[in-house]
Amino acid sequence: MPSLEIKPPAPLISIETSSTSTAAASTTHVVLLPFMSKGHTIPLLHLAHLLHNRNIIVTIFTTPANSFFIRSSLTHTTVTVFELPFPQSPPNLPLGVESTDKLPSMSLFLPFVHATKLLQPHFEQILATLLPHVSCVIHDAFLPWAQLSASKVGVPSLIFFGMNTFSMIIPRLVVEHGSLRGVKSDDELFSLPSFPNIKLCRRDLNEPFNDPEPKGPLFEFVMESGRATAQSSGIVVNSFYELESIYVDFFNREFNPKAWCVGPLCTASPLSQHESLEKPRWAQWLDDRKAKQRPVLYVAFGTQAEISQTQLMEIGIGLERSGVDFLWVVRGKEVELGDGYEERVAERGMVDYASHDSLPSWLKALFLSSQYLLPLASPQTLPCGFQA
């Protein structure tokens, strides 16, 4: 099995982030390269606001079809946006698809990832000419080729990880310890030597980590991302130390390069004119549940999970018959739950319609309430288990 060992990074450059040090900050230039998926892009847009508010020069790269979303999220800032031409006829991809939410199926994820590599020459060409000279490139972990690009022009790079440190540790330990060898069923519980109190089963792990001997194209991509991480100067994590100090300390003690928790980044962006500090309806409903000491089941499958209308109807029936209070986040208004469903469950259930475009509002309201920590629309099962 390929080794997952990560070697120590080169020393991290010092980035001045004090808003009072205008002279030093005026020459600090950070480049951001988000993966072309809303759930990956939005946190880096929040980071762009955070850096901009510290008087740091920020440049962000995107593609033409994603440019409007990027630019509209950065109004009233001086952040520079560069568009990289997306391949016109990438192998195995529909014409005009430049983000994962436009993919007809997530089975095309790997072809999409491979297509992004064709952005590399244009990225390097612009990166080498930017002024002031770039201090650091922060790129998504799904774009490992960006680390090589930064290295070519002599710029340190940081990997951006949008979930939490816990999610980086567990799959890695499962592979390194061979924890699934001897596990006979998807539901059989096992533990890890480093965290004996955590009980997992194979269902808790996504591909390729749910295979006792992971292999194949997806695992090869994971390994490629790991090699890029090994050569980077560190990992920027959209989490906060107080939430998972045990796991942050473990990661930085056992692995390299170091991980820095800089989140929750959603609190960095100021509220726009159409937003307010008033809690949304779902948050007020949760306040009412808490006051009545009634536990709430949170149900969400993300905005890109492939769930049929029949499956959604069955989930709705199950929730209605369960007798428990629930908050169910569904994707868009296209979901048909049947006539009178919301009225029938109104006493103990709420259905909230969301999209990735509304995630910043969800996260801002979540942390403004300071009372709820819920697993929010993630493609991974592990973060949900960690937060439960």
Image (cartoon, rainbow, N blue to C red):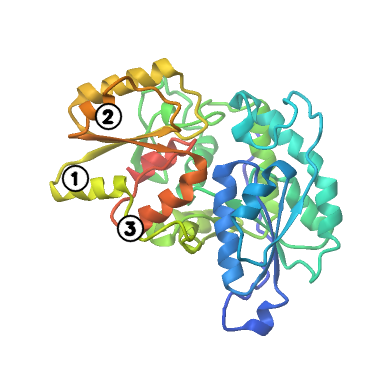
| Of marks 1 and 3, the one in the foreground | 3
Q: Are marks 1 and 3 in contact (CB under 8 Å)?
A: no
The quadrant where residue 339 appears = top left
Nearer to me, 203 or 61: 61
| Of marks 2 and 1, the one in the foreground | 2
Nearer to me, 21 or 201: 21
Q: Amino acid at mark 3?
A: Glu
Compared to residue 141, the image places residue 371 above or below, namely below
Nearer to me, 269 or 231: 269
Q: Is residue 380 visible?
A: yes
Q: Residues within 10 Å of mark 1 (few under 14, many from 20)?
A: some
N-term mark: 3 or 2: 3
Q: Which mark is residue 289?
A: 1
Percent coordinates x, y for residue 8 in the rendering: 65, 58
SS for dot 3: loop
Side of 274 where 132 appears, left or right: right
The quadrant where residue 81 appears = bottom right
Circle 3 is placed at which residue position?
278
N-term mark: 1 or 3: 3
Side of 62 where 272 appears, left or right: left
* C-alpha span from label 3 to label 2: 23 Å
Q: Are marks 2 and 1 in contact (CB under 8 Å)?
A: no
Residue at the image point whose x is 31% and y is 58% from the top: 370
Residue at the image point whose x is 57% and y is 71% from the top: 53
Percent coordinates x, y for residue 305 in the rendering: 50, 28
Q: Amino acid at mark 2?
A: Glu
Q: Which mark is residue 342?
A: 2
Residue at the image point whose x is 54% and y is 49% from the top: 162
Percent coordinates x, y for residue 180 in the rendering: 47, 28
* C-alpha span from label 2 to label 1: 17 Å
Q: Quadrant of the N terminus?
A: top right
